[in-house]
Image (spheres, helix red, strand yellow):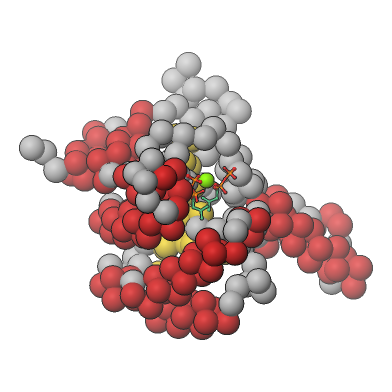
Amino acid sequence: MKDPIKAIEDTSSERGETKRPRHIAIIMDGNGRWAQTRGLPRIEGHRRGVETVRMISETASELKIDAITLYCLSSENWKRPETELQFLMHLLEQYMVEERRTIMDQGLRLKTIGRRDRLPENVLQAMDKTLAMSANNPGTQLVLAIDYGGRDEITHVARQLAREVAQGSLSESDISEDLINNRLYTAGLPDVDLMIRTGGDMRVSNFLLWQLSYSELWITDKCWPEFTREQFLGAIDDFAMRQRRFGGLNVNE
Ligand code: IPE
Ligand code: IPE
Ligand code: MG
């Protein structure tokens, strides 16, 4: 059987252009439902979800995708029961320690986006160590959205710009889309080309509100713990077939 990664490369080169997404963002949803339909506690779904994270990071790295952003915890997820939150914090700390080896072996460059002030100290310490260790890695940027909310991010930028205008270091006419882009948590990353959501819900759930403006959306009913490499490659294949118009007309029409 033909190697699917090779197949994606061939399709790109036949067209004489790269139709491979540079930045893929994923809403990793359905952990709880996956567990509950199997008679397991919800946290078991989160634990299994980490294995999918590993597989996705490895595949993205093999494909030389520039950046992959994974929604790990939303700013609204604090509404969850204390026990589930404690487990998620434990899992985050464990991930930051145990995945260090894989992150380094794959040459992944870790980045986090979201608020830091509500995360426990032990999670921050483990996270900062992995961030520092991987900072000069040449490979795919692995961006973890932790205590992240799109509205929170935009509010944060608005406050920062208002402060600078009030202080006189910025004038109102300097505020452009590019400037805002450069102040978002995702500054420096390419636009999100493809957004994948598992778990079947057709919504954005406060993820990357600004950055998803012209992303291609790809949603599957499969839950995150059962999401496979083949499906991931299938989503990338589908992306290559999409016609993106960005509000204009097709080039050949
Ligand atoms: C996504 O899975 C992971 C987090 C939000 C932390 P869920 O926990 O939302 O799983 P479902 O949607 O309830 O099945
Ligand atoms: C989105 O999933 C957040 C993450 C995957 C981290 P949710 O389960 O929180 O989304 P809603 O509540 O169904 O919109
Ligand atoms: Mg959910």
Q: Is residue 150 visible?
A: yes
Q: Nearer the viewer, residue 246 or 137?
A: 137
What residue sits 21% from the left and 45% below the top? 5
Residue 49 at least partly seen: no
Q: Residue at x 40, y 74 (%)?
A: 94
The percent coordinates of residue 77 (x first, y second) are 61, 55
Q: Is residue 62 above or below residue 34?
A: below
Quadrant, the N terminus: top left
From what the image shows, is residue 12 above or below residue 134?
above
**Residue 145 falls in which quadrant of the image?**
bottom right
At 37% from the left edge and 60% from the top edge, which residue is drawn?
A: 47
Along the viewing direction, whichever of 234 and 31 lies nearer the viewer: 31
Judge by depth and name the residue closer to the eye, 206 or 184.
206
Coordinates of residue 161 in the picture (x, y in percent)? 80, 63
Number of numbered discs: 0
Query: What residue occupies the far front of the structure in this picture?
Result: 39
Answer with left or right where residue 6 lies relative to residue 228: left
Residue 248 lies, in percent from the top left, at 58, 26
Q: Residue at x 53, y 28 (%)?
A: 245
